[in-house]
Amino acid sequence: MNSLEDIIDKLSESLLNFMPNLIKAIAILVIGIIAIKFLRWIMKRIMNRNPESDPTLIKFAMNILTWGLRVILIVMVIGALGIETSAFVAVLGAAGLAIGLSLQGSLSNFAGGVLIILFKPFRVGDFIQAQGEGGTVMEIQILYTRLLTPTNQVIYIPNGSLSNGNITNYSKEPIRKADLTIGVGYNSDIRQVKSILKRVIEMDKNILKDPEPVIRVRELADSSVNFQIFAWATNENYWQMLSDFKENAKIELDKEGIEIPFPQRDLNVKYLQEKKS
């Protein structure tokens, strides 16, 4: 009975001795969480004051800062509890090495994300084509980049493969050039066709006057004379311009009786009359 009381007394004494460290650790944890939120708010305001600040860089930097401060806070809380932090840091380093070896792909994606942020091959809001997928960049995360396709599908591409592969950024320049082909029949007047196509271009407000559009004969194909049209438009109006030009070209060519050839085949059928023997 005395031994049980002694154990309870020792536990009570140990708990009383540990209470100051526990209270200190809880206070550090609460103050640290508030301080991290405050530092995030300060850093975000400082970065947003610069008109040239990239929203993608701001968000990426905020994520790195938050996780770094959280690790420091955990070490401080453990130290406040009376645990030897040097041993904990050593264990943390060993665990980090083991995790790093097992997550080499994730580390590659992290490095790819850093490269994307530094060299800026694209930004949030750009329309890109990469890894066989195309869409608008919605978010550049630490490990993945999130795209939204024109058909409203969300695609996540690993930053490692994204940074090491070919990327086509359709939004990098403010204007885009369309390379269009219109075919007409061989019996058409070339000068008349050029005049009609020029009129179609002048009708379209989305086609820029500078750079100047180009109309020329591309090739004499098997069944058509193919005209090549270079037309420029802003990124916002590009797809609408493509659709309007094709529609208006068909309407105007039909008005003038210009034939747009289509694949066709002539069949010659011979009837053989069997002779009765």
Image (tube, rainbow, N blue to C red):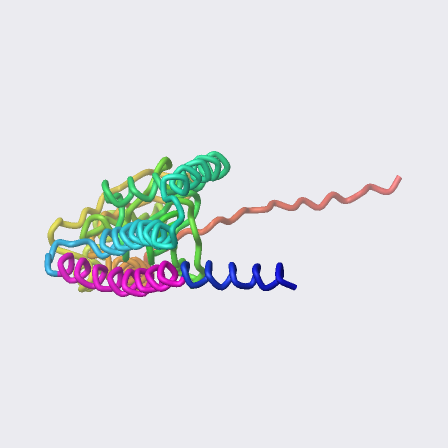
Residue 182 visible in this rendered orientation of the protein: no
Depth order, front residue of 158/227: 158
Q: Horizontal and vertical percent for residue 65?
A: 27, 52
Q: In the image, 49: left or right of 255?
A: left
Give x and y (percent) for residue 136. Answer: 34, 56
Which image quadrant is residue 91 in?
top left
The secondary structure that most of the magenta stretch takes on is helix
Of residues 37 and 12, the one nearer the viewer is 12
Q: Is residue 28 magenta?
A: yes
Residue 176 in the figure: left or right of residue 274: left
Q: Quadrant of residue 114?
A: top left
Q: Which quarter of the figure is the N terminus placed in?
A: bottom right
Q: Is residue 112 left or right of residue 95?
A: left
Q: Residue at 59% of width from left, 64% of height from top?
A: 5
In the figure, is residue 51 to the left or right of 90?
Answer: left
Q: Nearer the viewer, residue 135 or 66?
A: 66
**Closest to the observer, 205 or 135:** 135
Q: Which residues are magenta?
A: 19-48
Q: Is residue 144 magenta?
A: no
Give the residue furthest to the right: 277
Seen as rendered, the residue at the extreme front is 2
What residue is rendered at 34% in x and 40% in y?
112
**Image location of residue 2, percent across then percent down:** 62, 62
**Snapshot quadrant of residue 216:** top left
* Residue 148 visible at all: yes
Say how many tags the image has: 0
**Residue 173 appears at what percent x and percent y?**
19, 49
